[in-house]
Image: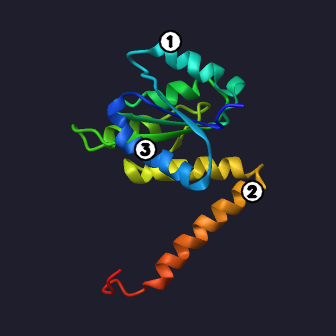
Amino acid sequence: MTAPVGIIMGSKSDWPTMQHAADMLDKLGVAYEVKVVSAHRTPDLLFDYAKQAQGCGIKVIIAGAGGAAHLPGMAASQTSLPVLGVPVKSRALNGIDSLLSIAQMPGGVAVGTLAIGDAGAKNAGLLAAQILATSDDALLKRVDAFRAEQTETVLSQPDPRTAE
């Protein structure tokens, strides 16, 4: 079986953002594959990827894109797998264009839209793991441990003036 998560992006320049999704999946012990698949420059490759993903063992697709940001929606149009869209920060409009392109999907073509940039990518990795954890008790325990660790980090330093 291949990796259960596919991380796709429109350009290799999106990797510094999308790496945060990969880092979260690494932290939680979830296998993934990474590919550059452009909605505009390689549409046939995108359609092939999305149509074949489920048959290859992928269960969740994380798609990052900037600017016009058609990648997540076009991937979702070709598969019934969950697609999580990460708006990559653009130079022109700081990612607002990306966010709106991903969030404004027509009814019937669902894309889970995350925050712009690094936090969105990190949360996409976490959300993908949580989706997979609905049928994987060991992964659910790792997600719970991650969340408990975050809580402990906050509780251990309640005074922001305290140096870490």
Residue 22 is situated, as x and y percent measured from the top left of the image, at: 50, 45
Which quadrant of the view contains residue 18?
top left
Q: What residue is drawn where x is 59% and y is 67%?
A: 147
The answer to whether residue 136 is left or right of residue 71 is right
- At label 3, which amino acid type do we have? Gln
49 to 44, vertically: above or below: below
106 to 152, vertically: above or below: above
Q: What residue is drawn where x is 39% and y is 31%?
A: 69
Disc number placed over residue 44 in the picture, else none: 1
In whole angstroms, how far apart are the C-alphas of marks 3 and 1?
Answer: 25 Å
Q: Are marks 1 and 2 in contact (CB under 8 Å)?
A: no
Callout 2 crowding tier (Cα within 10 Å): few <14, some 14–19, many ≥20: few
Q: Mark 3 points at which residue?
A: 19
Disc number placed over residue 138 in the picture, else none: 2
Callout 1 crowding tier (Cα within 10 Å): few <14, some 14–19, many ≥20: few
Residue 114 showing in the rendered view: no
- At label 2, which amino acid type do we have? Ala
Residue 81 is situated, as x and y percent measured from the top left of the image, at: 66, 33
The answer to whether residue 51 is left or right of residue 8 is right
State which quarter of the image contains the C terminus: bottom left
Q: Which of marks 1 and 2 is nearer the N terminus?
A: 1
Residue 137 is situated, as x and y percent measured from the top left of the image, at: 77, 56
Extreme-top residue of the structure: 44
Q: Do the residues labelled 3 and 1 touch (CB within 8 Å)?
A: no
In whole angstroms, how far apart are the C-alphas of marks 2 and 3?
Answer: 24 Å
119 and 136: which is toward the camera: 136
116 and 10: which is toward the camera: 10
